């Protein structure tokens, strides 16, 4: 393990998560009028609807896959009779399908943001930056699938799982040690993922915190005609 591994993958993740949480709380407390997606649907709706649906379905499934895949202890998979090799193939397959769906939607959204004059005129620098960062991160993730064919035994995946789980138990040194042996493409993917956490509180992504969960449990709205 090098000093750079320890800095980027043992210390930086905690800094990124601290900025993510504290920054979000401060923005909610001080700038609630900016706590929105900043929808541009009135300026252009067709491409937005097409790209947004594909992007949101894809990104939600990709994030769920990362969360379950990285944070579920390997003992649980062993108990269920799921080998690392089989889990690797499932991750590659589902990650590829939903990653491509997300890529399709994000491509439409980024093209719309950059080429539609009306949408571009109302876009902030952060609006464009966050889309570009998501695009880069998604491409890195899709490229990593091809590298995964070189180790279908799931060995690299187990190292990434060890990295994530050691971070959760606040053992940054062990986390950095675990990830030090993985390929560069995976390190880049992890690093850019942490960078997204850093910019999250300063972008429109904060609307993720406002997902309308209560909507599904609310009473039905009764509408009567006169």
Image (cartoon, rainbow, N blue to C red):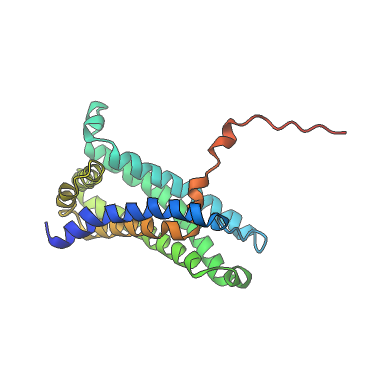
Residue 160's place in the image compared with 203, above or below, is above
User: Number of marks in the image?
Assistant: 0
Side of 217 relative to 107 (left or right): right
Residue 193 screen position, x and y as percent: 34, 56
Residue at x 26% of width, y 57% of height: 12
Depth check: give the residue in front, 20 or 142. 20
For this orientation, the residue located farthest to the right is 226
Could you tell me which residue is drawn at 56 percent across and 71 percent down?
115
Residue at x 32% of width, y 46% of height: 92
Which of the pair 183/215 is nearer the observer?
215
Residue 119 drawn at (x, y percent): 60, 68
Q: Can residue 141 be seen by looking at this rendering?
A: no
Query: Which quarter of the figure is the N terminus placed in?
Result: bottom left
Judge left or right: residue 192 versus residue 51. Answer: left
- Depth order, front residue of 135/90: 135
The image position of residue 128, as x and y in percent, is: 48, 67
Nearer the observer, 154 or 128: 128
Compared with residue 165, is residue 51 higher up or lower down, i.e. above or below? below
């Amino acid at each position: 393990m090098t000093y750079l591994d320890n800095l980027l993958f043992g210390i930086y993740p905690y800094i990124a998560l601290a900025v993510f949480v504290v920054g979000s709380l401060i923005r909610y407390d001080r700038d609630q009028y900016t706590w929105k997606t900043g929808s541009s649907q009135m300026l252009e709706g067709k491409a937005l609807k097409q790209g947004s649906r594909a992007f949101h379905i894809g990104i939600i499934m990709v994030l769920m896959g990362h969360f379950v895949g990285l944070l579920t202890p390997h003992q649980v998979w062993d108990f269920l009779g799921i080998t690392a090799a089989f889990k690797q193939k499932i991750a590659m397959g589902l990650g590829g399908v939903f990653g491509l769906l997300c890529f399709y939607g994000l491509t439409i959204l980024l093209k719309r943001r950059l080429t539609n004059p009306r949408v571009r005129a109302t876009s902030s620098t952060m609006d464009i930056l966050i889309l570009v960062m998501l695009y880069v991160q998604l491409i890195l993730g899709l490229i990593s699938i091809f590298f995964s064919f070189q180790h279908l035994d799931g060995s690299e995946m187990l190292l990434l799982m060890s990295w994530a789980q050691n971070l959760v138990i606040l053992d940054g040194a062990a986390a950095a040690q675990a990830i030090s042996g993985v390929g560069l493409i995976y390190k880049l993917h992890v690093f850019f993922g942490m960078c997204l956490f850093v910019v999250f509180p300063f972008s429109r992504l904060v609307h993720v915190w406002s997902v309308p969960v209560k909507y599904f449990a609310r009473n039905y709205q009764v509408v009567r005609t006169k």
